Amino acid sequence: MTTHLDPFAQNKKSTNVRIFDVIGQKINTWLERRRDRRRLASMDARALRDLGIDPAQAEFEAARKPWQEETGLGKDIEIGTDCTPRGDWSLNSVAPSAGMPETIRIAGLPIGLRPVLPEDKENLRDFWNGLSERSRQLRFLSVKHRFSEFELDRLSRVDQQNHVAWVAVDLTSPRERILGEVRFVKAGPKSGLAEFGVTVGDWVQGRGLGRKLMQILSVEAKRCGVSTLRGYVSEGNALMLGYVMHRGGKIALDYPGVMQVDLPVSAVSETIMAAAE
C-alpha cells in the first residue's frame, strides 16, 4: 500500500509552525522588555547614574508598553568633541596609558590595568559577589545581594567616552580575575562633571591599588574633557574621605550618612607627576 503525502498540507503545516515561532519570539521579547522596564522603575537616581542611564530617560522608558521599541537608554548619545576616541582593545591586552605602567605588582602578584570589555560581564559578577557586605555597602551605599543581567550588561558594555570603566586583573588567572574596578559617567556629552566610583577587592585593600585606579581615571577624565569627579561616599569611608581632603577636594553632606565629594582632576594628575619625579 502506498501513502501519498499532500504537499499542500505539508506546506500549510510548515507555515503554521513558522507563525507560532514568530509569535513566541515576539512574546518573549515583550516579556523581557517588561522585566527590564520594571527594574528601571525600581532603581533610584544614583543607581541609574552608576549604570550610565539618565534618570529622566529611564522614567520615560519605564512607562513605555512592552510592544514599544527601546529608546536606547544612552547607547546612541552624542559623543562630545572634546573626548578623544581610543582604539580597540581585546581581552588579555593590558592597556598602556599616559605615564601608567602596563602592569603593577602587589604582594608579588602581577596585576594588569585595562578598560572594561563586554567579555568581563561574568568576571564582574564574580568580583562583586565576592566582596564583603561592608565593601558592597561602601561602594553602592546599600548591601546589594545580587546584580541583575540588565545591570551587568550596562556595567560591562560601556562606550569608554561618556561612561568610562577600567579594571585591575590578576594576570596569573586564566580568566583574568578582577581585583578592582573604577568608572565614571559624564553628566552630559560635553559636561566637565562626571560621577565616579571605585571598588577594590577585600584582600588587596590598603595596598595602593585604589590610588592607582584613581590615577588611571584621572588620565581618562582629562581625555574626555572632565575637570571634576563627583562621588557619594559613606561617612564611614575614612580612606576615601581622607584621599579627597588630601587632594583639596570639597566635601559636603548629601543626606544623613552620605557625603558628596568633588575631586579636581588636576589634583590627581599632579599626584601622578609628583610620583613620576
Image: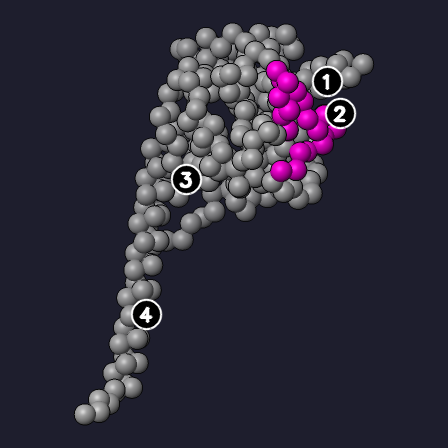
Under mark 1, the amino acid is: Ile
Image point (48%, 32%), residue name:
124
Residue annotated with mark 1: 272
Question: Which class describes the residues within 10 Å of circle 4: few (<14), some (14-19), or many (20+)?
Answer: few
Residue annotated with mark 3: 150
Residue annotated with mark 4: 18
Q: Position of residue 103 (x, y in %)?
A: 68, 26
Disc 2/disc 1 C-alpha distance (Å): 8 Å
> Mark 2 and 1 residues: CB-CB less than 8 Å, in contact?
yes
Under mark 3, the amino acid is: Phe
Q: Nearer the viewer, residue 178 or 40?
A: 178
Instruction: Tell me the number on the disc at residue 126.
Output: none
Under mark 2, the amino acid is: Gly
Q: Earlier in the sequence, mark 4 or mark 2?
A: 4
> Mark 1 and 4 residues: CB-CB less than 8 Å, in contact?
no
Disc 1/disc 4 C-alpha distance (Å): 61 Å
Q: Position of residue 34 (x, y in %)?
A: 32, 46
